[in-house]
Image (cartoon, grey):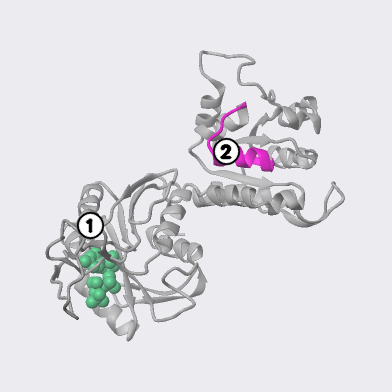
Amino acid sequence: MLSGKNILLGICGGIAAYKICFLIRKFKQNGANVQVVATPNALNFVTKLTLQTLSQNEVKVDEFEKIKNFSPEHISFADSSDIFVIAPATANTISKIANGICDNLLTSVACAFTKPMIFAPAMNTNMWKNSAVQKNIQTLKNKGFRFCDPESGFLACGYNGQGRLCDVEKIFNKVVETLKNGSKLKGKKIVVTAGGTREKIDSVRFLSNYSSGKMGIAIADTAYNQGAEVVLISTVKTSKPYKVVNVDSALEMKDAVEKEFSDSNCLIMAAAVADYRAKEIAEQKIKKTDEDEITLTFVKNPDILKEICTKKGLEQIVIGFCAESQNLIENAKEKILAKGCNFLVANDISRKDTGFSSDYNEVLILDKNGNINKLEKTLKTEIAKEILKVLYCD
Ligand code: CTP
């Protein structure tokens, strides 16, 4: 199952380190080449000799031990491995990686690693619940790194609660799944827009909408995890291991989309673009007057999706979104024809339990021929996987 794959296995100093011996065996039995990088503390729990014998490779701990071929090991490991699995991942190492600290070989490799990374944390239950640790875990999850969350049960420290390393079998399966999915979109450039545009009115005010950008970001993360070169054009500020172009207004989004689209395979317009912008942006804050009413004039924004569809090559796929508060199917059918895109993802924004700012969505995927695929209510991350399936034959 893992023949030809190079797995970099980072082991931190926690009692669960002993369980990783079984994980190494499983990787080896399935044909992988396993390179262990251990923190100095990991070797208090499991010996170098054990790890070396199981992995059949020299275990690395110190960055400056032996520098071969003038190639720093943290860079050569990062470049030559297909995946980096950190198990057990301790609170200390997770927090350092989340904050870009590189104070040993393992954290330096993590900082230079651009391919899929999986963390399998294990720690005392109070450490797991600690708000600073949870914040760091969230930072890593937001960056698209994967986690095999710890399980609940009896812990070596005597506590009962969440913190126990998840089953080694689960880590193994996640690695297999990640490597399998990791090449589905290899070689494809995918441009995704996300968030609601902000149309300036004066120096302190803007017109916008409630879009959180979660759907677009979930699509971009998933495409990246499936091996695509991703460009996210977003009104929501976010830091990702792939290219993010931050924009505010519809005009800025249009410029960015035009720049990125020409050499791309696919554009996914998940952003909620304002249809109108202020005719004039006041340089100073608009002052209150004695009048009870104020009139502002708005002019139409370009329809980015529609315009790009008139320029797209035969091989390029454009996926639009459609936010409707009534007559979802009828409006979506009209919209896919009016915009000229290959697919349209339609969602009902009148629902409180899905759509804007929710982690969940329920959508219809329409194609040009009138076929409709209904995706029942599920996490936006799952919807993202289904949407991207239109780009490959599974
Ligand atoms: N869109 C766009 N440029 C605009 C408005 C919308 O590119 N100026 C894109 C959105 O990103 C989305 C699709 O068009 O992919 C549909 O957006 P939606 O708001 O549902 O439709 P509109 O075209 O704005 O029409 P209406 O608001 O009247 O429903």
Return the residue nearer the eye: 166 or 249.
Answer: 249
Q: 116 left or right of 224?
A: right
Asked which secondary structure carries label 2, the reply is helix
Q: Residue at x 62, y 31 (%)?
A: 106
Residue lying at the far bottom in this picture: please name it: 327
| Neighbours of disc 2 within 10 Å: few (<14), some (14-19), many (20+) | many
Numbered badge on residue 203: 1
Q: Which residue is mark 2?
A: 97
Whether ligand 1 has any atom under 8 Å from the Cβ at mark 1 is answered as: no
Whether ligand 1 has any atom under 8 Å from the Cβ at mark 2 is answered as: no
Q: Residue 243's image quarter? A: top left
Q: 88 left or right of 292?
A: right
In magenta segment, residue 92: yes
Q: 289 left or right of 73?
A: left
Residue 176: % across, % down: 60, 48
Q: Earlier in the sequence, mark 2 or mark 1?
A: 2
Magenta part of the chain: 85-104
